[in-house]
Amino acid sequence: MGQYRRSLEIIADILSVVKGGARKTRIMYQANLSYRLLSRYLDFTLESGLVSISSESEYYYALTKKGMEFLEQYRKYSQRIREVEEQLKDVRKERALLERMCVLEPTNSGIRNVLGRRNRDE
């Protein structure tokens, strides 16, 4: 099953579509949104000043300077998140390796590993 997108991802997807100018239908399909969600997020991006209604038509949306800045910052943020997630995955692997290296040792109250956890076989 797919993972739900967060609000920032949805906004970035909308802005990416609007970057070259777009109508609602194009935004809805390319950003993969229902009409209800599209309307809600378009209203939000308009109110936030990320998107404007084009002077050509009231149904045509254009990216503002603030929207361009948001997309650039979001790109940097996304890259940083990917890097941190990779590092975290590596740290978890290292921890698992260290935990596997721990030896079980007997105690008065049963068998515990050196990390203080009870053996699951008890």
Image: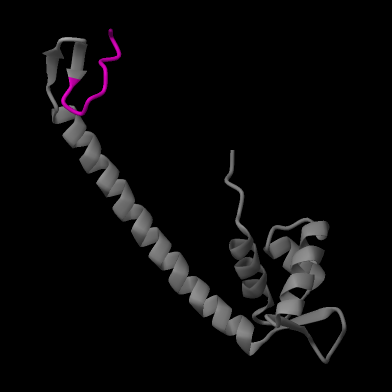
Q: Is residue 64 magenta?
A: no
The magenta segment: 113-122
Q: Looking at the rendering, in which quadrant would you find the C terminus?
A: top left
Q: Check the image and name the residue furthest to the bottom.
A: 55
Q: Looking at the rendering, in which quadrant would you find the N terminus?
A: top right
Residue 56, image x, y percentages: 84, 90
User: Relative to 43, does residue 116 appear above or below in the rendering?
Assistant: above
- Residue drawn where x is 64% and y is 62% of the image: 10
- Residue drawn where x is 12% and y is 22% of the image: 103
Residue 16, image x, y percentages: 62, 73
Of residues 117 and 2, the one nearer the viewer is: 117
Q: Is residue 50 left or right of residue 88?
A: right
User: Relative to 77, does residue 85 appear above or below in the rendering?
Assistant: above
- Which secondary structure dominates the residues rendered in magenta? loop
User: Relative to 92, does residue 110 appear above or below in the rendering?
Assistant: above
Q: Total marks drawn? A: 0
Q: Is residue 111 left or right of residue 84?
A: left
- Residue drawn where x is 35% and y is 61% of the image: 83
Q: Is residue 43 left or right of residue 120?
A: right
- Residue drawn where x is 51% and y is 72% of the image: 74
